Amino acid sequence: MVVYVLVVWWSLALQGPLLLRLLLAIGLFAAFAITWGLLVSPKAKWPLRGRADTAFRIVWFGLGLAAGTLLILGK
């Protein structure tokens, strides 16, 4: 859940029109939720296994970390 919060918060903190930032936040949330639901959740339609699962989780949490870092740095 923290990854979702950080990605949405980061997108809302960007410069630009509010409507564009809201659309970006909704789009990123949907993309992250759908990707997680289809590939990694316990009821995933196409569950990843082994190294693919590990790689996905590294990228997933890495993107969350990047969003949090950009928030802290004000980028």
Image (tube, rainbow, N blue to C red):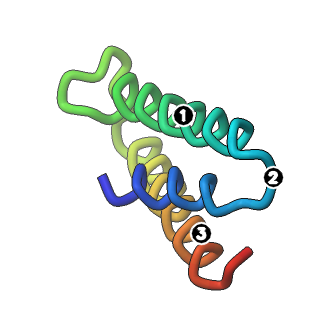
Q: Nearer the viewer, residue 66 or 40?
A: 66
Give the CA distance from mark 1 to mark 3.
18 Å
Q: Is residue 5 above or below residue 39?
A: below
According to the picture, the residue beneath numbered tag 2 turns out to be 16
Residue 44 lies in quadrant: top left
| Circle nearer the N terminus (2, 3) | 2
The numbered mark at residue 26 is 1
According to the picture, the residue beneath numbered tag 3 turns out to be 66
Q: Position of residue 13 (x, y in %)?
A: 63, 62
Give the CA distance from mark 1 to mark 2.
15 Å
Task: Count residues near mark 2 (Cα–Cα under 10 Å), then give few for <14, some for 14-19, many for 20+.
Answer: few
Q: Position of residue 57 (x, y in %)?
A: 42, 53
> Helix or strand or loop: what does disc 1 sit on?
helix
| Circle nearer the N terminus (1, 3) | 1
Query: Which residue appears farthest toward the left when viewing the image?
Result: 42
Mark 1 or 2: in front is 2
Query: Which residue appears farthest toward the bottom when viewing the image?
Result: 73
Mark 1 or 3: in front is 1
Q: Position of residue 40 (x, y in %)?
A: 33, 35
Q: Is residue 30 above or below residue 14?
A: above
Residue type, label 3:
Ala
Q: Is residue 69 above or below residue 67?
A: below
| Circle nearer the N terminus (1, 2) | 2
Q: Is residue 13 above or below residue 50?
A: below
> Helix or strand or loop: what does disc 3 sit on?
helix
Mark 2 or 3: in front is 2
Residue type, label 1:
Ile
Task: Count residues near mark 3 (Cα–Cα under 10 Å), then give few for <14, some for 14-19, many for 20+.
Answer: some
Q: Nearer the viewer, residue 34 or 45?
A: 34
Task: Kindly indicate whether the residue at mark 3 contacts the one at mark 1 (C-beta within 8 angstroms).
Answer: no
Give the CA distance from mark 2 to mark 3.
20 Å
